């Protein structure tokens, strides 16, 4: 088999209908993975080595695999580079409002934790 064909990697991506809520929530429960998701939501598709995370390359590969197998991200190989994008439309189709709500409530650098606008009336006794 020619060397160029041996290097072709087939990455598993679940179909939209097969996305499982618990798998998605598990994937989003890790701070490093949320950093990746927030960067993708803000900037769009990125090369795998361009994320601002402080983990070893092998650990980053693990995080990408968890996100990919849960259906949160899609990855494609282009030459010797792998590009990652957020499966935003698939997630919105399968779980309407979930991703928006999680992203809105996740703390981003410099702004702290977002809070919902909830009004509570206090009654003086």
Image: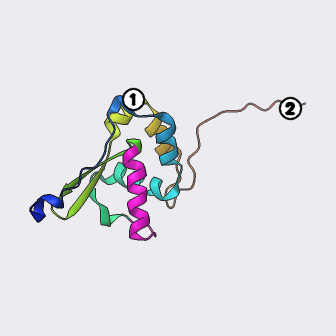
Mark 2 vs mark 1, foreground winner is 1
- Residue visible at 21% across and 63% down in the picture: 81
- Residue visible at 39% across and 29% down in the picture: 94
> Looking at the image, which residue sits at the far right?
125
Query: 54 or 16, which is in the foreground?
Result: 16
Query: 62 or 97, which is in the foreground?
Result: 62
Residue marked by disc 2 = 124
- Residue visible at 23% across and 55% down in the picture: 9
Comes first in the chain, label 2 or label 1: 1
| Numbered range of the magenta stretch | 52-69
Residue 86, given in percent of the width and then of the height, sits at 33, 46
Residue 44, given in percent of the width and then of the height, sits at 29, 51
- Residue 9 lies in magenta, yes or no? no
Dot 1 falls on a residue whose secondary structure is helix
Mark 2 crowd level (few <14, some 14–19, many ≥20, 10 Å Cα): few
Residue 79, given in percent of the width and then of the height, sits at 15, 62
Residue marked by disc 1 = 94
Cα distance, mark 2 to mark 1? 45 Å
């Amino acid at each position: 088999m020619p060397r160029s064909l041996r290097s072709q990697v087939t990455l598993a991506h679940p179909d939209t209908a097969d996305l499982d809520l618990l798998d998605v929530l598990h994937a989003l429960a890790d701070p490093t993975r949320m950093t990746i998701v927030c960067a993708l939501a803000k900037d769009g598709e990125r090369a795998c080595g361009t994320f601002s995370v402080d983990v070893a390359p092998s650990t980053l590969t693990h995080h990408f695999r968890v996100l990919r197998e849960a259906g949160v991200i899609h990855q494609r190989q282009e030459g010797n580079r792998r590009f990652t994008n957020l499966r935003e439309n698939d997630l919105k189709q399968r779980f309407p409002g979930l991703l928006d709500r999680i992203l809105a409530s996740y703390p981003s650098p410099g702004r702290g934790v977002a809070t919902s606008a909830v009004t509570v009336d206090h009654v003086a006794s």
